[in-house]
Amino acid sequence: MDKQMFALRSPQIDANHLDEDFNSYNWEIFSSLFRNSYSHLIHTFKHEFQLFLRLLTSYNTLLSSRYSATIGQQLLQLKYSPLIQTRSQKFFFLSSIVFSYLYEKFLVDYRRLLPFQFIYKLLLFINFLLFLHRGTYINLFERLSRLKTIHNHPPSLRILDYSYMKRELIWHTLNETLGTIIPFITSLKARTLMRKYFSGTIMKRLEQTNVCSVCEQSIVMPHESIGECKHYFCYICAYSLIQHSCPICFKTINNIKPKEFSSK
């Protein structure tokens, strides 16, 4: 029988993160059930409930006779080899869950055990360095129980096809380009550019003294620009055009004043 090789490093890391995300999501759903009532129990027995959820998840996945993998490993087509069948392996696995519970509940905030925390984190760091170097045993539980993470199906040589990657790159480039350009194009400037190509009849209608050049409705409280622009607008429309260009003559409006009516 051929010797089974360890799974690649990146799938093992991804599976580990997926397990952590699943535990966080599982706890979030469980705690939301008691958010409106018995919330004090969730706060008081938070670590106990988390321990119960982890044991329940492990009982239905890793410790069951049907599966030999965690949730993250199942999603990435990984598993443990050999299966967790011996008493020592089950003991190490359950001990890792109970130890994480004890560590989070009692040891994290206990100052007298700071040296122990340092030693524990140092062991985790050394184990992770060994994992990066050799690709074996991503956590201490796997190293103590000598469990190998392998692929369900041995990886085979494949013909690389970058068509999907190219589509993704094109889409993300287009998305970023539009996201950069669109904020600089205000709705007023867009309407101005569109009106530039309209027919002359529409432009003549907008140049009438009783029609606002912005909202294209009858003028309410007529105002005009103080400057070269001689078109008329509603007060609200004229106020919104300050420091912008007129939609008709494209001249900048710096200030406005009420429309002056000649008395005859």
Image: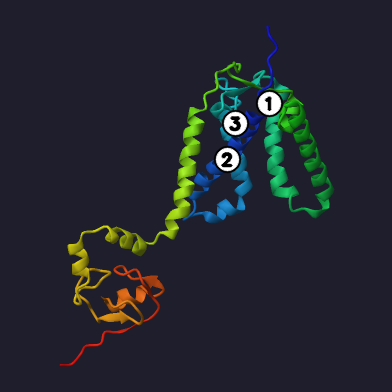
* Local secondary structure at mark 2: helix
Q: Circle 3 — which element? A: helix
Q: Which amino acid lies under the numbered mark 2 shown in the image of this protein?
A: Asp
Residue 264, placed above or below residue 252: below
Give me the C-alpha separation between circle 2 and circle 3.
Answer: 15 Å
Residue 226 location (% of width, % of height): 35, 82
- Residue 219 percent coordinates (x, y): 22, 76
Q: Residue at x 53, y 41 (%)?
A: 26
Whether label 3 touches label 1, CB < 8 Å = no
Q: Residue at x 29, y 68 (%)?
A: 248
Of residue 156 and residue 182, the one placed in the foreground of this image is: 182
Residue 214, numbered circle: none
How many numbered marks, from 0 up?
Answer: 3
Percent of width and height locating residue 95: 71, 33
Viewer-nearest residue: 18 or 83: 18
Marking on residue 90: 1
Disc assigned to residue 58:
3
Please name the amino acid that badge 3 sits on.
Answer: Ser
**Mark 2 touches mark 3? (CB < 8 Å):** no
The image quadrant that residue 74 belongs to is: top right
* Quadrant into which the C terminus falls: bottom left
Q: If the image is split into quadrants, where does the N terminus sit?
A: top right
Relative height, residue 75 to residue 36 (above, below): above
Q: Mark 1 is on which residue type?
A: Lys
Q: Is residue 83 left or right of residue 183?
A: right
Q: Is residue 86 visible?
A: yes
User: How far apart are the alpha carbons under marks 1 and 2?
Assistant: 23 Å
Disc 2 marks which residue? Answer: 21
